[in-house]
Image (spheres, helix red, strand yellow):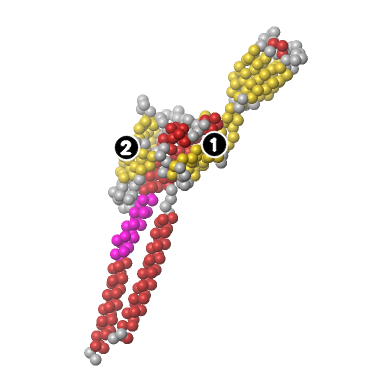
Amino acid sequence: MTRGQANLLGLAVALLLLSGAIGVTLAVGTGAFATADSDARDRAAAAGLADRLVSADGPLTVRENVLDGATVDDLNATALRAAFPAARDRAVRVRLGGETLVETGDPAGPTVRRLVLVERRANRTLTVPADQNDTVRLEPTGAAAVTVDRSARVESLVVNGRTVAHEDAGLNGTIHLDLRRDRPTDLALNGSIRSSSGTVQIRTHPWETEAAVLEVTVDV
Amino acid sequence: MADRAVSPVVGKVLEIGLVLLFVATVTGALSGGVVPGARTAAGGEVADRTLASAATTVEDGVPAAGRVGSATTHLDLPDRIRGETYTLRADDRRLVLDHPHPDVGASHRLALPARVVAVRGAVASDDPAVVRVTQTDDGLVVEVTTA
């Protein structure tokens, strides 16, 4: 009897092996599902927040993709949450040019990057000797304040060939000029009498922009 | 001596029984737990992606500041997730994917400018969906609706 059922044992072993193979296959399949767990919504949230941060009507920007340096320096978690509802109740990290601006929690989601310009206004004061018929080249700036004393004998200010101020006796006081911010300005100081001692002070607010990468990471 | 004739018959019956038992066990395990689990996992992932892509479309559908306020954007949705139709609806600046299966579906907060005053509407997945942005006196209204 026992000898007659020997192949039954063989069948049982074969089925056992088959069960093992099925088990391994299922484990691999489940593992594939587990690793395919992507962060689609984290990425969408980060992209949405990044687009808000660089949009033209956002509180941080001067124009589209141009961040205001002073505002960015003042940015903290409270300000970020107040200005961007999309950042509330989430772990968010915002980095600019490799430096962390804001970090709430420890987000581990994908990082979305945007190339931006950071614009800062510098205050620059230029003091030039009031030589007769001197030309000064100014960096692009929206406005300039020229302070001149009568003793400098500067009779007219000429911006890019256009006379903007003239006084036969010599200009005196501070003259505010509106300039084009997209190109440098040639400012000519013209006089008919040479002055030996006078100086002219020119205050400008040139824009300084630098490119930086804005990195946003969000955990939903 | 009569036992010797019975022996092969008994053996075959036992073999057949064993194989049937094996097939039944494997089929039961697969259809009872593994396959529905995999369907739910895949469905949940597809739902996540659908929601993420729909949220991006809604956010991109809002015209930039200073542009004319109204716009209609086509929203691309898969008809079925996990073999069933579902509903995409907007709820208080969130986009919600409602699915009959409790483990599938999610809700996603939209990143929208302050000019948007309301987000509303709902659409079934087997209807053609659009995002309609309209300008009102208070601001922009975003509506998820059928075309």
Q: Residue sitting at 48 percent across and 38 percent down?
A: A50
- Specify the quadrant that holds the C terminus of chain A: top left
Pinpoint residue B8: horizontal percent, then vertical percent.
28, 84
Pinpoint residue A33: horizontal percent, then vertical percent.
40, 56
Q: Residue sitting at 42 percent across and 29 percent down?
A: B68
- Res A176 label: none
Please state which amino acid type lies under the numbered disc 1: Val
- Specify the quadrant that holds the N terminus of chain A: bottom left
Q: Is residue A25 above or below residue B74?
A: below
Q: In the figure, residue A123 lies in which quadrant? A: top right
Is A186 inside the magenta-drawn segment?
no
Q: In the figure, residue A164 lies in which quadrant? A: top right
Asked if marks 2 and 1 touch (Cβ < 8 Å), the reply is no
Q: Name the residue under label 2.
A: B121
Q: Which of marks 2 and 1 is in front?
A: 1
The chain letter under disc 2 is: B
Please state which amino acid type lies under the numbered disc 2: Gly
- Res A116 label: 1
Describe the element under mark 2 as helix, strand or loop.
loop
Pinpoint residue A77: horizontal percent, then vertical percent.
47, 36
Q: How many labels does the image show?
A: 2
Q: Residue sitting at 30 percent across and 73 percent down?
A: B19
View extreme (left): residue: B2
Neighbour tally class for label 2: few under 14, some 14-19, many 20 plus, Cα within 10 Å: some
The chain letter under disc 1 is: A
Pinpoint residue B135: horizontal percent, then vertical percent.
37, 29
C-alpha separation, residue under disc 2 versus residue under disc 1: 35 Å
Describe the element under mark 1 as helix, strand or loop.
strand
Q: Give the range drawn in magenta.
A: B27-46
